[in-house]
Image (tube, rainbow, N blue to C red):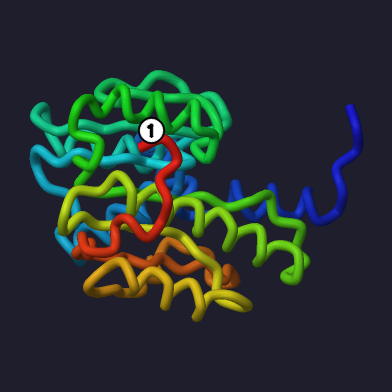
Amino acid sequence: MPKRSKSSAQWLRQHFDDVWVKKAQAMGYRSRASFKLLEIHQKEKLIKQGMRVLDLGAAPGGWSQVVVPLVGRRGQVIATDILPMAVLPGVTFIQGDFSDEKVVQQIQSVMGSDAKGMDLVLSDMAPNMSGIPSSDLPRAMALAELALELAVNCLAPQGSFLVKVFQGEGFTEFRQQVLKHFQRIKSHKPTSSRPQSREIYLLAQGLRTAVNASIPPRGL
């Protein structure tokens, strides 16, 4: 078995000593990230019964797991990730890269005839971090931009978009880009986010339907 690097071993120690990791394990959540979405939901009353929700970069399923009981039986949860995800009752999972037209077509197929019928698009995606901001931030921003593109093209009028981004180069420009498509935007730094992390969550609400066509759709 290959020897772990010093930084990797340190991350593992911090991860398993993390109070939120222990709390997630005790409560049966698949990820400590579940608490981030729960906190934002509690503040914003974000997820309601009957909503249709698309969870991008969903594996291992911590956010989808939170969403399912909140949308109830009348709701719909679609999740996608390039990684596999264990079956989660109430979730339709599509494995693949959501920027691939074939994957978008699969999402469209699950959505049915209402191709702009999602109420909420979630993205907790992040690239594998190297610890080098000049490399990590552009890759993280590229994922956020792809998520925004898909959200604009599949959300219902007045729909919402919650996305993880990282403060630093490109953040202000991305926030302005989001505001071109949504009526209002808020920033959230959940308590369960690691203090040293640059991550922040942008909640954009009220899709401006007049600009939907300004981002060319990928198969939707």
Q: Position of residue 63 (x, y in %)?
A: 36, 43
Q: Residues within 10 Å of mark 1 (few under 14, many from 20)?
A: many
Task: Provide residue 211's location: percent of width, then percent of height.
Answer: 28, 63
Residue 113 appears in which quarter of the rendering?
top left
Q: Residue at x 40, y 40 (%)?
A: 62
Residue in the picture at 20% in, 31% down: 76
Can you give x and y, in whole percent of width and height, for residue 133 in the image? 72, 70
Residue at the far right in the pictured view: 2
Q: Is residue 98 left or right of residue 38?
A: right
Dot 1: element: strand
- Per the image, the residue denoted by label 1 is 79
Give me the residue at 43% from left, 32% from top.
Answer: 104
In the foreground, 91 or 3: 91
Picture quadrant of residue 162: bottom left
Kind of residue at badge 1: Ala
* Residue 11 vs residue 213, the one in the foreground: 213
Side (left or right) of 159 relative to 32:
left
- Quadrant (top left, top right, bottom left, bottom right) of the N terminus: top right
* 51 vs 133: above or below: above
